[in-house]
Image: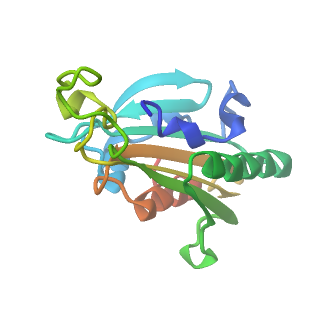
Amino acid sequence: MMLAASMTLPAFAVASHKSSPRVPVCSALSHGAIANLVGTGPLALTKKIGNLCAFAGERHGHYKPVLTIQIVPWSKSLFSLAEGDAVQSAAREHAQFGVVSRALKVGKKAFFVSGTTTSASLPPCGSEEAPAPAPLEIRTGPICAGEPALTHINVTGYGPSPSGVELMVSAGGAAQQGDISLIHVIDLVKDLISGKIH
């Protein structure tokens, strides 16, 4: 549950360790533009592996939002593999898999996985099984009954970038329910492919 955002990242997460000069570097993207679009609050880079970046945000009184972004050159086999992994992940996690409507103009094709983790099956807060929890702001999800749900969303799409390279972009986020929305993560992928966020 702590890595809910990354659980739906496709298999290409480690496929590319070097970024082409024409592929945007995830750590160099505008943190402010991403935070404003997705609603994470101020973003800080927490980890970078190749061109896969993990970020953490800040929302007072809410779980710490987390976001992952990966940008690689597109290939048909890589996209198909990622889509197959997303279908399997959705089934395994009892989440929703879907294809993004072409009307939203997210590159040539995009798909998503979204789901919610609730506290319904967790022990009561303050019980022997779940001692007093830490403040929400330093956690990324519920640890005892009665706490807010966690929403996790991953969107992967591909299309032509302004540099002429076909990019494959994956963005995954997890935040307290109501703090992150599918349409905002779809817009993030669209803006990364189109170069609107750079």
Name the residue furthest left.
61
Depth check, front residue: 93 or 29: 93
Q: Is residue 92 left or right of residue 61?
A: right
Q: Position of residue 30 (x, y in %)?
A: 39, 42
Name the residue furthest bottom.
103
Q: Tell me how the rendering is colored.
A: rainbow
Q: Is residue 80 left or right of residue 106?
A: right
Q: Residue at x 23, y 42 (%)?
A: 147
Q: Position of residue 61 (x, y in %)?
A: 14, 40
Depth check, front residue: 16 or 195: 16
| Residue 49: quadrant of the picture | top right
Q: Residue at x 59, y 66 (%)?
A: 106
Residue 23 appearing in the image: no
Depth check, front residue: 138 or 58: 138
Q: Quadrant of the N terminus?
A: top left
Name the residue furthest right.
77
Vertical placement of residue 67 versus 167, above or below:
above
Q: Residue at x 53, y 36 (%)?
A: 6
Depth check, front residue: 181 or 32: 181
Tally of numbered discs: 0
Residue 115 appearing in the image: yes
Q: Is residue 151 left or right of residue 130?
A: right
| Residue 101: quadrant of the picture | bottom right
Q: Residue at x 62, y 25 (%)?
A: 50
Q: Position of residue 88 (x, y in %)?
A: 70, 48
Q: Position of residue 183 (x, y in %)?
A: 44, 65
